[in-house]
Amino acid sequence: MGMKQTLEVINRMEADGIVGRYAIGGAVAAYNYVEPTVTEDLDILVSLDAHRQQPKLGLVTLGPMLSYLQQKGYSEFRKEGLVIEGWPVQFLPVADDLDAEALAQAEEVEIEISAAEGSVKSRVLRPQHIVATALRTGRPKDRIRMVQFLEEDAVDLGALCDVIGRHGLLQAWQAFCHRTGMSDPCDVQLPP
Amino acid sequence: MKEPESTIYPDISDILARKKEGRVHLSRLSFGEKIALVEALRERLAPLKRARERRIAAKSLRQTHSS
């Protein structure tokens, strides 16, 4: 029981057509690029295009996914996550253009957790999308993550500024720069 | 008149440098190694997490009884 098995279950969901394309987001995605921090859950950004005929709101959309998992014996909820092989998994349907771009451009990875366990294939959000999503969410822990990426030089600033500019996050970005006392590396000017 | 004695603090720059090295080392681990590390850490932290949850539950219960 562990992350490898969790991802194998999610890969199976994708193969079975229960969910569309998915990618790891949040703190676990950040592990691919920066110093790891402890997290309680695994965020999975997921496309639910397969269920387009259903209303695109809240739990109704997640219904087929939850019943599929329940049939496999996964029915325990911990906080907002459904526990799959020991990890509470939070499925986050694509909710805006930033999510859609992040998912479309997610990086294919093969994760070897240990030599004994072998590896598992998955996808992980790219640094600029992790930072932009953290900026959009804006909790203290998201700001810490953003600082980590910037301080560890783990995000391409050009790519980040491009994403921030295209997804209406300029004001939030400038507020973040002001709050952390850093000069704006994007050097963006808001329209008057 | 005697000058006030200034407190002499130890130089901890070597400790801070080692901590920084540790952070750099952690950030350079592979994705899988980081996941394994965090999974082990979660197991070690589980008793602390359970104790915190018990404290919160007890506090909530006390507040319910006192109101």
Image: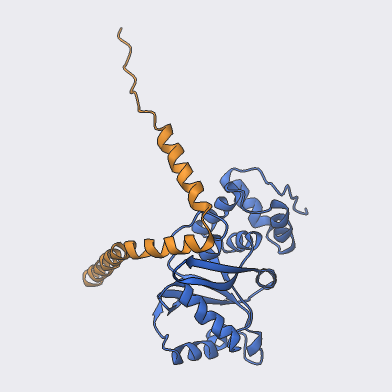
Snapshot quadrant of residue A19? bottom right
How far from the left and from the top, in percent, is residue B4?
A: 32, 16
How far from the left and from the top, in percent, is residue A34?
A: 54, 55
Snapshot quadrant of residue A48? bottom right
Per the rendering, the colour in which chain B appears is orange
| Residue at 61% over, 46% down | A178
In this picture, residue A54 sits left or right of residue A28? right
Query: Who is closer to the viewer here, A166 or B41?
Result: B41
Residue with the most extreme top position: B1
Q: Is residue A155 above or below residue A22?
A: above
Q: Is residue A79 visible?
A: no
| Residue at 53% over, 52% down | B28
Residue with the most extreme right position: A191
In this picture, residue B42 sits left or right of residue A26? left
Per the rendering, the colour in which chain A appears is blue
Query: Who is closer to the viewer here, B16 or A167?
Result: B16
Query: Who is closer to the viewer here, B63 or A74?
Result: A74
Q: Quadrant of the N terminus of chain B?
A: top left
Query: Who is closer to the viewer here, A179 or B38?
Result: B38
How far from the left and from the top, in percent, is residue B62?
A: 22, 68
In this picture, residue A150 sits left or right of residue A75? right
| Residue at 61% over, 43% down | A182
How far from the left and from the top, in percent, is residue A95?
A: 63, 75
Color encoding of the figure:
by chain
Q: Is residue A173 visible?
A: yes
- Total labels drawn: 0
